[in-house]
Image (spheres, grey):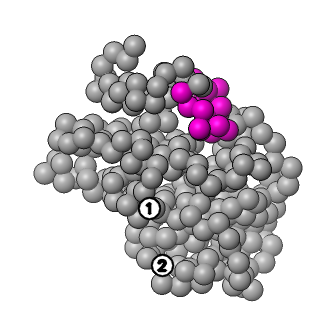
């Protein structure tokens, strides 16, 4: 029974973030019903009249995390980020040109724009609070895009992208960590290469989001934030940055999960 519960926890984590940064072009959006309804220091919020009452909470959450994320990454974003809040799943799915999307597809972000289903109408797979976390997760993706600048996101490791976004948004907890350790005791976890070279759907099915967050936690706890930022800038130079082979880092990560000595 414990294993079944653990697996379900990880599945929930994976469905929350399926769309994160997977829709690079947000063209032909149906935004006619949205209007500028609130401005904060770093964000402009667009919504229908019915969702105006949730914008203060979204602004508070985003502004709370903005300084920490941009400080961690050593960046300044020189323009305000648009946040578009859609009243329901149907309107959001139409806006991202994915009308038949599953109901757990609730948010995305690219360059200088975040799009999300209203936390007041989260659908059957989400809650008010999970969508508050999703908006921070999506902003983290936007911030990483600015770090990458001209390099873009092509070829950027999924485990690093999603693991870091989950880390900053606080979307992993002790229950999920214990679930991953439980999986480790039953079978081998996916390798970093497997996490990098897979489709978004398979990534979610292999519990890639929670697992990737533990990789990022391990790298930060063991080697510090500065090296992680270097890795975000130049993931192809991982062995130079850490002074170890990738295989050795992976083995250290497994020992970290098992609470065994790393070095």
Residue 54 lies within the magenta run: no
- Front label number (2 vs 1): 1
Give 242 or 111, whichever is nearer the viewer: 242
**Secondary structure under the numbered disc 2 in the rendered image:** loop
At x 60%, y 65%, the residue is 108
Quarter of the image with the C terminus is: top left
| 59 to the left or right of 250 | right
Left of 230 or right of it: where is 1? Answer: left
Mark 2 crowdedness (10 Å alpha carbons): few <14, some 14-19, many ≥20: some
Q: Residue at x 25, y 49 (%)?
A: 6
Instruction: Tell which of 174 and 185 is nearer to you.
Output: 185
According to the picture, the residue beneath numbered tag 2 turns out to be 101
- The residue carrying pointer 1 sits among few (fewer than 14), some (14 to 19) or many (20 or more) residues within 10 Å by Cα, namely few
Give the label on residue 142, or none. none
Residue drawn 60% across the image and 32% down it: 237
Residue 170 locus on image (x, y percent):
51, 43
Task: Specify start and end residues of the magenta stretch as a single range.
Answer: 223-239
Q: Main secondary structure of the magenta part?
A: helix
Residue 244 to residue 21: above or below: above
Residue of label 1: 199
Residue 220 appears at what percent x and percent y? 53, 28
């Amino acid at each position: 029974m414990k294993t079944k519960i653990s697996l379900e926890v990880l599945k929930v984590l994976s469905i929350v973030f399926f769309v994160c940064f997977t829709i690079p072009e947000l063209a032909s959006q149906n935004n006619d019903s949205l209007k500028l309804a609130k401005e904060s220091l770093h964000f402009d919020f667009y919504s229908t009249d019915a969702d105006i009452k949730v914008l203060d909470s979204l602004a508070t959450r985003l502004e709370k995390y903005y300084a920490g994320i941009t400080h961690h990454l050593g960046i300044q974003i020189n323009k305000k980020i648009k946040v578009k809040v859609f009243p329901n799943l149907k309107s959001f799915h139409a806006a991202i040109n994915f009308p038949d999307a599953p109901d757990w597809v609730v948010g995305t972000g690219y360059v200088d724009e975040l799009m999300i289903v209203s936390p007041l109408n989260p659908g059957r797979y989400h809650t008010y609070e999970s969508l508050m976390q999703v908006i921070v997760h999506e902003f983290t993706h936007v911030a990483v895009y600015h770090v990458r600048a001209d390099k873009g996101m092509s070829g950027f490791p999924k485990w690093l992208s999603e693991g870091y976004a989950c880390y900053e948004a606080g979307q992993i907890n002790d229950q999920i960590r214990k679930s991953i350790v439980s999986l480790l005791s039953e079978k081998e976890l996916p390798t970093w290469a497997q996490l990098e070279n897979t489709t978004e759907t398979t990534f979610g099915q292999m519990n890639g989001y929670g697992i990737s967050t533990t990789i990022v936690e391990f790298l930060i706890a063991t080697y510090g934030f500065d090296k992680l930022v270097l890795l975000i800038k130049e993931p192809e130079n991982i062995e130079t940055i850490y002074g170890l082979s990738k295989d050795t880092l992976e083995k250290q990560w497994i020992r970290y999960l098992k609470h065994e000595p790393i070095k």
